[in-house]
Amino acid sequence: MRVPPEGIDFYYPPEELLAGTHGEVIWSRPLIGEAALASARHNELVLYRSQDVRGNPIAVSGIIALPGKPAPEGGYPVISWAHGTVGSADSCAPSRDTRDSPAHIYNKHPHAMLNHFLEQGWAVVMTDYEGLGTYGPHPYLLGESEARGLLDIVLAARQLYPELSRRLAIVGHSQGGQAALFGAHHAPRWTPELELRCVAALAPPSGVKDQLLEGSAYDGKTGGLSFTPLFLTGAIAGDPRILPSEVLTDKAYELFPHAETRCRADMTQEDSWGGIKGICQLRERDSLSKRAFFEQLDRMDPALMIGVPIRISQAKEDTRVKAFRTEALYTRLMKLNRGVSVEYTVHETVPPTEYPEELGFHFGLMETDQDPLTAWLTERIQG
């Protein structure tokens, strides 16, 4: 393993270092600063090998956090954390977080829950996902890509720290909830050497195509429309034949590059996707690209066959990920996974947060659900 370069060059290795087995460490270094978890005995920034959905070798970045308690017999249980939406620009990646980043508030909020997991004596690993922090666009909501990032970082962590056990739980919020379900679905084939015990998804998005169509019929402006270029970026990674110029209007196509240069919070501004009406996003004319785009959105739905216990949680008044969609997802997961425990917890209220009112319920779920989620995880990953 080479000595890593300083600064952000850490994230951009030479091409000859990409080849190898997925989950192998390229290099690592201690991590301090805003991205580090305060309750960790040690935080390590890691760059590891993975593959995109077409089998091309890539590098993915992330964080490994070790608990302060001594390792139990058999090693530390591992939580692979799947983060929520921050955007696709490299600077938004959780492991590159700074106090003045537009994504800081979104990257920092999960730390309370993750520190709580460390205090239970569990190791926490946190992928940035493909293309976030590192080369290439981030394939937003492309489930197999997210799954590989979530699973390969566990292999990398165990290479660096043999005191980590094979026992694994995948936990995620928002985008990460959808990613977590895909991670659990792909784990038996992608990382059979790991022992996945369970998966927990907090406010996982589903019915993405319906959300897009609702937004494209809206005769007004809203920051929520900034998800459209992210949906499209993920779909193109799944099907490179999709041409954004055939999907988006001229105005929207002009704004499309913002997905790679701005955090999602900045894309809500008037000079970006927050300044365009919903009805002005998609071309009216049908095309092969537009049909392929919608087909890819359907493939992003996390109603999947999963062979381990599943826990879904949701804030009733969440306006970002709506409860009726999550309830429908739960019903589909129940039908697909007969004989597997599938639980659904709805929280009627959540505590206030520092977020705008319409997002408070979405992010407050992590605080409200922390203790019941921890109890559920303890039953399944201890021993």
Image (cartoon, helix red, strand yellow):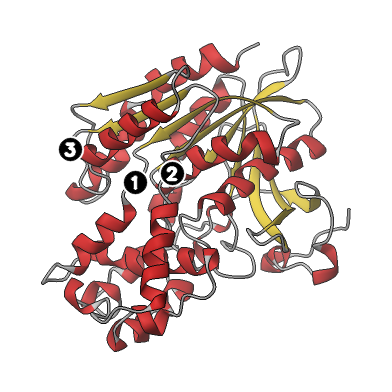
Query: What is the C-alpha distance between the residues marked 2 and 1?
Result: 7 Å
Rendered position, 170 above or below 29: above
Q: Is residue 214 left or right of residue 257?
A: left
Residue at 40 percent across and 61 percent down: it is: 295
Looking at the rendered structure, the kind of residue marked 1 is: Ser
Whether the residues at callouts 2 and 1 have beta carbons within 8 Å, the answer is: yes
Residue ID for mark 1: 206
Q: Position of residue 100 (x, y in %)?
A: 44, 62
Q: Could one spot residue 273 in this view of the protein?
A: yes
Query: What is the C-alpha distance between the residues marked 3 and 1?
Result: 16 Å
Rendered position, 306 above or below 94: above
Residue ID for mark 3: 317
- Given residues 191 and 336, the one toward you in this image is 336
Residue at 53 percent across and 63 percent down: it is: 238
Residue ID for mark 2: 178
Whether the residues at callouts 3 and 2 have beta carbons within 8 Å, the answer is: no
Q: Is residue 91 left or right of residue 13?
A: left
